[in-house]
């Protein structure tokens, strides 16, 4: 399925912002550990920011499975579409 570009771009923006990296460095496969700030704490910040932005909530089990941009986008799509 084709990814929703709006969601994808929003998630990339959030990751770039939280990790303080250029948006150009963030791609669909960017994952935990790719950037210094994307550690376990950074990951929670990213996920909570995504939740706020889209008005959704991930349960803890889901959060464990979200490891890269693709995972996060798919999870968001599953809740908003």
Image (tube, rainbow, N blue to C red):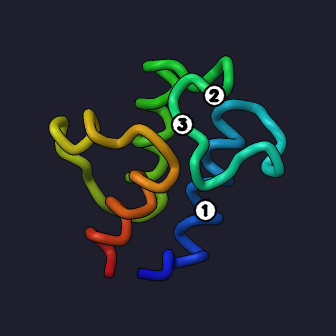
Q: Quadrant of the N terminus?
A: bottom left
Label placed on residue 34: 2
Would you name the residue on which mark 3 appears? 31
Q: Which of label 3 and label 1 is nearer to you? A: 3
Assess disc 3: are there few (<14), some (14-19) or many (≥20) residues with their C-alpha within 10 Å of its C-alpha. Answer: many
Q: CA distance from mark 2 to mark 1?
A: 18 Å
x then y, percent, for residue 16: 71, 42
N-terminal of the pair, mark 2 or mark 1, is 1
Question: Which residue is at a point 83% across and 50% down the rendered structure image?
Answer: 24
Question: Which residue is at a point 32% across and 59% down the rendered structure image?
Answer: 75
N-terminal of the pair, mark 3 or mark 1, is 1
Q: Which of label 2 and label 1 is nearer to you? A: 2
Q: Are marks 3 and 2 in contact (CB under 8 Å)?
A: yes
Q: Secondary structure at mark 2?
A: loop
Would you name the residue on which mark 1 appears? 10
- Residue 52 appears anywhere in the view: no
Is 20 on the left or on the right of 4, as rendered? right
Q: Secondary structure at mark 1?
A: helix
Q: CA distance from mark 3 to mark 2?
A: 6 Å
Q: CA distance from mark 3 to mark 1?
A: 15 Å
x then y, percent, for residue 49: 48, 45
Nearer the observer, 14 or 27: 27
Residue 2, relative to residue 66: is it above or below?
A: below
Q: Quadrant of residue 67?
A: top left
x then y, percent, for residue 23: 79, 49
Question: Which residue is at a point 60% across and 55% down the rendered structure image?
Answer: 28
Q: Quadrant of the C terminus?
A: bottom left
Q: Are marks 2 and 1 in contact (CB under 8 Å)?
A: no
């Amino acid at each position: 399925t084709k990814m929703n570009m709006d969601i994808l771009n929003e998630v990339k923006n959030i990751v770039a912002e939280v990790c303080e990296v250029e948006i150009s460095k963030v791609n669909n496969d960017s994952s935990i550990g790719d950037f210094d700030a994307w550690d376990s704490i950074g990951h929670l910040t990213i996920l909570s920011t995504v939740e706020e932005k889209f008005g959704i909530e991930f349960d803890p089990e889901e959060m464990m499975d979200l490891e890269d941009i693709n995972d996060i986008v798919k999870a968001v799509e599953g809740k908003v579409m």
